[in-house]
């Protein structure tokens, strides 16, 4: 799969939306370029531009605006971001280290594929860790904060479907990390944060390419009630059920999207007559 990179859309540094009192960033990891604090040494220009290009490309890959399997060259990246070779290589090296792209000698780079195994691994870990987080957070959560995030998950934004999914993912990530934060275990929080970042790409591929929005908010409401009541067992049970349900939904959509975009991983059968 080859393409002219980013020809159909613009990338903005600070796209955001205030939904139900919660500011949602469009970037997959909820970050934006930080201004250096007073007294901090300036970053070399090539490094700064390379890091900016990395941030934007990572966002495009995670949001599946650059689909798995897409091929591109250093020259395309340099032209797109108006950067030199040194900055380009900084960006691509970081993306390769993070597993988002791979180098193809004499043929440029390729966006790393998404496989069914990726879905299985991410959700297998979430099914163990999210119930643990819910159990530890029972009786320790901020009800008003969780309810605002839950309402943001349900809010229908009058924008294109891809952006609706972006808003949902930010609110959903915030909801689950608020529970993890209340659990009081820093390592658990950081691990879940990384898993939710990985899940963003899976959901963007599965639901974004199929043009549908996830609908899982009923579990959120039940989780809030059990967490506020301090019912650790029920909170953990609902958390596991929630992850299991979303795994099944995501797996179905990811497989359909991989077929539709002609990047079905090896070993996955194609439906008769093409896409399913």
Image (cartoon, rainbow, N blue to C red):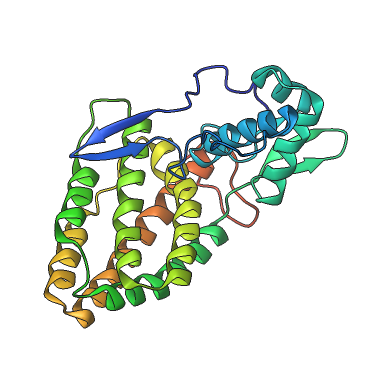
- Residue at the image position 25 percent from the left and 76 percent from the top: 237
Residue 153 seen from this side: yes
Q: Does 74 sit left or right of 38 as displayed?
A: right
Residue 138 % position (x, y): 22, 75
Residue 234 % position (x, y): 19, 78
The part of the image, by quadrant, that contains residue 146 is bottom left
Residue 276 seen from this side: no
- Residue at the image position 77 percent from the left and 27 percent from the top: 74
Residue 210 % position (x, y): 39, 38
Residue 202 % position (x, y): 47, 49
Q: Residue furthest bottom?
A: 233
Comparing 195 with 185, the one in front is 185
User: Looking at the image, is 250 positioned above or below residue 239?
Assistant: above
Q: Does 101 sit left or right of 160 as displayed?
A: right
User: Looking at the image, is 148 positioned above or below residue 42?
Assistant: below
User: Looking at the image, is 152 positioned above or below residue 72?
Assistant: below
The part of the image, by quadrant, that contains residue 144 is bottom left
- Residue at the image position 56 percent from the left and 53 percent from the top: 269
Q: Report the quarter where the N terminus lies.
A: top right
Q: Report the quarter where the C terminus lies.
A: top left
Q: Does 136 sit left or right of 156 as displayed?
A: right
Q: Residue furthest front?
A: 39
- Residue at the image position 36 percent from the left and 70 percent from the top: 130
Looking at the image, how many numbered discs can be counted on the residues? 0
Comparing 269 with 15, the one in front is 15
């Amino acid at each position: 799969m080859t393409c002219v990179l980013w020809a159909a859309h613009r990338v903005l540094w600070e796209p955001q939306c205030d939904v139900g009192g919660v500011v949602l960033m469009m970037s997959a990891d909820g970050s934006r370029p930080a201004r250096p604090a007073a007294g901090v040494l300036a970053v070399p220009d090539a490094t700064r531009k390379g890091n900016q290009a990395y941030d934007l490309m990572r966002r495009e890959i995670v949001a599946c605006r650059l689909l798995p399997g897409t091929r591109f060259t250093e020259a395309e990246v340099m032209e797109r971001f108006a950067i030199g070779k040194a900055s380009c290589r900084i960006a691509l090296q970081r993306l390769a280290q993070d597993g988002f792209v791979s180098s193809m000698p004499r043929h440029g780079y390729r966006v790393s594929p998404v496989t069914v195994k990726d879905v299985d691994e991410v959700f297998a870990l979430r099914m163990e860790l999210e119930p643990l987080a819910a159990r530890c957070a029972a009786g320790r959560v901020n009800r008003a904060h969780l309810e605002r995030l839950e309402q943001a998950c349900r809010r229908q934004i009058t924008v294109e479907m891809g952006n609706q999914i972006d808003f949902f993912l930010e609110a959903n990530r915030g909801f689950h990390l608020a529970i993890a934060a209340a659990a009081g275990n820093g390592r658990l929080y950081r691990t879940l944060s990384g898993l939710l970042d990985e899940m963003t790409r899976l959901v963007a591929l599965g639901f974004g390419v199929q043009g549908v929005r996830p609908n899982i908010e009923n579990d959120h409401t039940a989780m809030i009630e059990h967490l506020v009541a301090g019912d650790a067992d029920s909170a953990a049970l609902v958390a596991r059920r929630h992850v299991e349900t979303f795994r099944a939904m995501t797996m179905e959509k990811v497989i359909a999207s991989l077929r539709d975009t002609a990047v079905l991983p090896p070993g996955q059968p194609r439906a008769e007559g093409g896409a399913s």
